[in-house]
Amino acid sequence: AQSVTQLGSHVSVSEGALVLLRCNYSSSVPPYLFWYVQYPNQGLQLLLKYTSAATLVKGINGFEAEFKKSETSFHLTKPSAHMSDAAEYFCAVSVRIGGGTSYGKLTFGQGTILTVHP
Amino acid sequence: GAVVSQHPSWVICKSGTSVKIECRSLDFQATTMFWYRQFPKQSLMLMATSNEGSKATYEQGVEKDKFLINHASLTLSTLTVTSAHPEDSSFYICSARDRLFPAPYNEQFFGPGTRLTVL
């Protein structure tokens, strides 16, 4: 079974500052990893995903994440925060290997609410 | 991008009644849809996987007879909460995967969610 832990339910940064949202995963098989963003009253939107190609993945809105197998981490970063980045962010893992009851399912972390101050 | 809608966006019902929530993929076909439940300040918990034309697969601990799922077409899945009680109050979210891109590394497209309140 796989699981995801997001460290910090709330992160607050100033506009223009670095954004770092932490995600650690546990999986008995090689994982696919995702970051989703949820704005109020909207559905989750995919920011980026790791699918075993490059370990540094670039996504939309200037976000990127690096897959570190040795640390079982997939932290999300953005060099300079913008007010419009304020939202809730979810890290998720999916099983890569076919078969089994977990194939294709997403397991989500607890979510991190990002607040951006002027 | 692909759009998934849910209807209604919110519903209030009396204890003991049943409530149906619709999930539609608007511009793509989905052989697989997923239903999640989200409690306040908590993560999304997968309830069941809905496959078009076949029975849904429920996660451990989810009551099949309470949460009826029907996936009658490639663009519509429904979740019916039967004999709802206050503890069923939650935020229900569906997602869908484009049938042309079924692999697990492909994106799931999420609906905006339905807020259910049972009095």
Image (cartoon, helix red, strand yellow):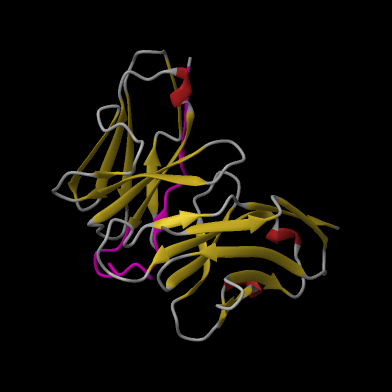
Q: Is residue B108 in the magenta section?
A: yes
Q: Is residue B1 visible?
A: no
Residue A6 versus residue A95 in the image, above or below: above
Q: Depth check: A69 or A86 in front?
A: A69
Q: Is residue A56 in the magenta section?
A: no
Q: Looking at the rendering, which quadrant does residue A106 occupy?
A: bottom left
Residue A72 versus residue A3 in the image, above or below: below
Residue segment shown in magenta: B97-118
Residue A92: percent from the left, percent from the top?
50, 60
Residue A45: percent from the left, percent from the top?
51, 59
Q: Depth check: B98 or B47 in front?
A: B47
Q: Main secondary structure of the magenta part?
A: loop
Residue A19 versus residue B61 in the image, above or below: below
Q: Residue at x 26, y 33 (%)?
A: B64
Residue B109 versus residue B57 in the image, above or below: below
Picture quarter with the C terminus of chain A: bottom right
Q: Looking at the rendering, which quadrant does residue B17 occupy?
A: top left
Left or right of B64 on screen, residue B40: right
Q: Residue at x 45, y 45 (%)?
A: B45
Left or right of B92 on screen, residue B103: left
